[in-house]
Image (cartoon, grey):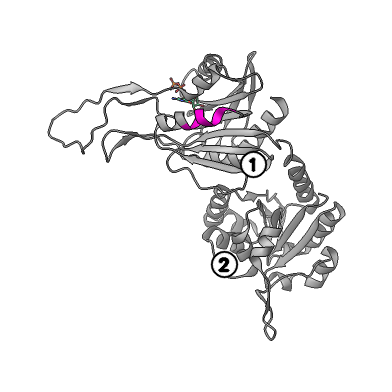
Amino acid sequence: MKGKKIILGVTGSIAAYKSALLVREFVRRGAAVKVIMTPFAAKFIAPLTLATLSKNPVHIHYLENEKTGVWTNHVELGKWADLILIAPATANTLAKMAQGHCDNLLLATWLSATCPVWVAPAMDLDMFAHPTTQENITKLRNLQVHVLDSPAGELASGLSGEGRMEEPENISSEVEQFFENSVVLSNKKWLITAGPTYEHIDPVRYIGNHSSGKMGIALTQASLDHGAEVTLIAGPGVPVLKHDRLHRVDVTSAREMYDAVLQQWEGTDVGVFAAAVSDYRPKHRASEKIKKTNAELNLELEKTDDILAELGSRKGKNQKLIGFALETENELENARKKLKAKNLDLILLNSLRDKGAGFGVDTNKVTFVLPQNKVVKTQLDTKPNLAKKIVGYIAENL
Ligand code: CTP
């Protein structure tokens, strides 16, 4: 952690007493730490404790001194940090973050920040299990906020269950690992495709699919977190992600995706093809809206180019290609065929038969299918967690 800059956000939960241990741990491991507290957090733990341990003044209010007009610049704080960790993060703060509220200095700083943001939820079990809290956590995950586990155990209320703040030693080890990982793919160029493609029938209609682009975005975030330079070729509706090492090209149709990918392929080290590319497009695109004059309408379709197969045939010695296979039957056999036919180094198999996996949902389950009949299965997990495993695997093994 030497030389790394961490903002620790502390919110109003009894677990705030653990934040002192976090600050001490980060400082011990060589990081520079600045603490921002919500006003309520300052009732659980003295700012003086955290200021002393972090060797920096603690920030609580926008306005530091009303008489002199001295104020805290949340934009500067947000830009200063390599990581913002909010621990403990109350149900209230998670809800405000999910909505983009900005009624305290900590929230204004996270809205201004461009670095990775982590939260360690801490609350009683029923508050944690409440559907609104779970929805807020899912929303934050989709905004690429890293949500730490809230393990089960004894709670301040005397009850026992999920909702405890993760232990400071585990958090600091995970942060350390994150900073270590952040250089693993330095100077590597990744190209990722994500989302669906739309093939126009006429000016108002298209052939598309249910891909949300969430898996592709999670993979983009994970490869950026490992230090790669990433070009994302995004189909329609793929969520927004901002990062200074990310170059994004938005496309609509399979043809546009093909052109964009081919233009970017030279110099790419790793290509990950998470897009659900349409296999067919209308042979003729009507220039005017098709009217319902006939009882039947037949659309003539033609094949689109298989982008991944094309790259497989021109793959350089040091270039790696990773594809996805979405199957509904004979899954493994079909995935192996695609791996070979498209000359891939790894194919990630999704089965629509797995509950919680596939399009639109926030979780996924994949099987790694490698040459020489090697297969590695994963458990159902959130898309960001799976993306981390996939990128880690590629970085380490390929
Ligand atoms: N793919 C691609 N270009 C296409 C079709 C698919 O690059 N025109 C890529 C996808 O991004 C995915 C992989 O190929 O990584 C496999 O896609 P999938 O739809 O599972 O398989 P297909 O090759 O289209 O075969 P089929 O539809 O017959 O299962």
Quadrant of the image containing the C terminus = top right
Q: Are marks 2 and 1 in contact (CB under 8 Å)?
A: no
Mark 1 residue element = helix
Mark 2 or mark 1, which is nearer to you? Answer: 1
Give the numbered dot on residue 224.
1
Find the magenta span and give its range: 260-266
Asked if one can make out residue 354 in the rendered structure from this viewpoint, the answer is no
Asked if one can make out residue 304 in the rendered structure from this viewpoint, the answer is yes
Q: Nearer the viewer, residue 166 or 162?
A: 166
Picture mark count: 2
Q: Residue at x 63, y 14 (%)?
A: 373
Find residue 118 and report its horizontal and vertical position in percent. Answer: 67, 52
| Residue 31 appears left or right of 297 | right
Cβ of mark 2 under 8 Å from ligand 1: the answer is no
Q: Residue furthest bottom?
A: 67
Find residue 196 and report its horizontal and vertical position in percent. Answer: 43, 35
Find residue 204 and report its horizontal and vertical position in percent. Answer: 27, 41
Inter-mark Cα distance, 2 to 1: 27 Å
Going by the numbered disc 2, the residue's amino acid type is: Cys
Going by the numbered disc 1, the residue's amino acid type is: Leu
Residue on which the image places disc 2: 102
261 in magenta: yes
In the depicted structure, whether residue 61 falls above or below residue 107: below
Label the magenta part by its dominant secondary structure.
Answer: helix
